[in-house]
């Protein structure tokens, strides 16, 4: 038997004023059973509170609260969590997720951060910042990617501007990173890069590397490890470095050619390695001087994975692209396919058209 709140409030008045109610008269007035009035009076005498039974409204967050809490506790931002659960058929707005995260943000900030200790010479981390577009001085847009290689112990970084994300390009970038950092670590952590992961045999929790990449890692002598999504402890160095790409923005509209932009990226890497890291207040280059002694020697036979004869189509401005640089050829070959052969020392290219050498260039 339900009890109207208005009946209960009336009975509270009778109790306070110490008036004995006429149950039948009040029941007729409110259109309820006299027994309901009597029950309300007895409860009012005992000081009981009537709680109206309310239908619980279903929230858009139902079924996602635990996921959100786990990801937020692991250090993920509200935006990253929102993007993640949308892929799992979440239909709510981003603001709902952001507001929900605020419920335990205070507790999260008070909780001690677990610092991951890195061993000298043990590992490196790799990622590619994709599809960066900047405009040169002539208003021409250039889209490129930034290859990132970080040594977690020293925070030493190697950056490389790339014009594609092919597997051969990855192998060349890794080779150059090994040369720049003084050798090869025991293990390298990779983000979900399509050129290393076999997506047909992988799922969200388990990544399988493709065979050609495994062959490269075996010959190089490092153990590849796939970063697990939403684990800042394993990919924090790379993600922090990716944020520094904003430091390229002042050069938007200021560079002359893609080669010039490539030089700017090289200078940025040098600056980053000579700036004190916020995590340890030390310069990466100083720690790296000690760390590099723990790396294994570079296997120069790795060049066979990316040094091969290649073809290029000559652009309308009589240029070809090779290894992230542009080179000029005769306008007579605009729109035609030319073959590029790299010398064994990797310092010179020979350009052929229909089997006839048309140019020889030293690499920049």
Image: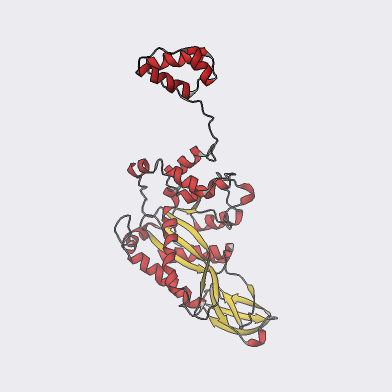
The residue positioned farthest toward the right in the image shown: 354
Whether residue 112 is visible, yes or no, is no
Q: Quadrant of the N terminus?
A: top right
Question: Residue at position x 32%, y 57% from top?
Answer: 278
Q: Nearer the viewer, residue 305 or 128?
A: 128
Task: Give 122 or 193, whichever is nearer the viewer.
Answer: 193
Task: Residue 205: give x, y in percent of width and height.
Answer: 55, 44
- Please name the residue shown 52% across and 81% down the image: 138
Q: Which percent across, then down, holds residue 164?
A: 57, 67
Report x, y in % for residue 178.
45, 63
How many numbered marks does the figure carry?
A: 0
What colour scheme does the image use? Answer: secondary structure
Left or right of 84, for residue 263: left
Query: Is residue 135 in sight in this rendering?
Result: yes
Residue 75 point in image, percent of width and height? 42, 47
Q: Residue at x 58, y 76 (%)?
A: 321
The answer to whether 165 is drawn above or below residue 9 in the figure is below
Q: Quadrant of residue 185?
A: bottom left
Q: Residue furthest left?
A: 281
Q: Is residue 131 above or below residue 257?
A: above
């Amino acid at each position: 038997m339900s009890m109207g709140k208005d009946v209960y409030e009336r009975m509270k008045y009778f109790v306070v004023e110490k008036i004995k109610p006429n149950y039948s008269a009040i029941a007729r007035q409110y259109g309820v059973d006299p027994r309901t009035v009597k029950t309300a009076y007895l409860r009012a005498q005992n000081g009981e509170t009537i709680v109206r039974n309310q239908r619980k409204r279903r929230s858009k967050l139902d079924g996602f609260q635990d996921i959100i809490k786990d990801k937020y506790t692991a250090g993920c931002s509200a935006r990253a969590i929102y993007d993640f659960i949308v892929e799992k058929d979440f239909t709510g707005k981003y603001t709902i997720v952001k507001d929900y995260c605020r419920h335990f943000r205070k507790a999260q900030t008070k909780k001690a951060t677990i610092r991951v200790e890195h061993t000298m010479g043990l590992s490196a981390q790799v990622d590619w910042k994709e599809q960066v577009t900047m405009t040169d001085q002539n208003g021409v847009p250039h889209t490129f990617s930034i290859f990132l290689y970080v040594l977690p112990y020293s925070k030493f970084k190697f950056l490389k501007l790339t014009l594609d994300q092919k597997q051969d390009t990855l192998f060349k970038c890794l080779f150059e990173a090994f040369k720049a950092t003084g050798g090869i670590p025991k293990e390298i952590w990779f983000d979900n890069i399509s050129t290393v992961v076999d997506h047909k045999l992988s799922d969200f929790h388990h990544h399988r590397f493709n065979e050609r990449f495994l062959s490269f890692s075996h010959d190089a002598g490092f153990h590849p490890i796939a970063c697990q999504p939403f684990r800042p402890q394993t990919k924090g160095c790379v993600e922090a470095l990716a944020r520094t790409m904003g430091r390229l923005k002042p050069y938007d509209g200021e560079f002359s050619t893609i080669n010039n932009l490539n030089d700017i990226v090289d200078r940025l890497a040098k600056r980053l390695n000579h700036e004190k890291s916020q995590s340890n207040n030390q310069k990466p280059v100083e720690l790296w001087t000690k760390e590099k002694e723990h790396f294994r020697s570079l296997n120069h036979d790795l060049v066979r994975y990316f040094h091969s004869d290649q073809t290029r189509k000559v652009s309308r401005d009589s240029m070809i692209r090779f290894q992230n640089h542009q080179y000029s050829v005769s306008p007579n070959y605009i729109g035609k396919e030319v073959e590029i052969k790299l010398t064994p020392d990797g310092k010179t290219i020979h350009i052929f058209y229909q089997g006839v050498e048309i140019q020889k260039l030293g690499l920049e």
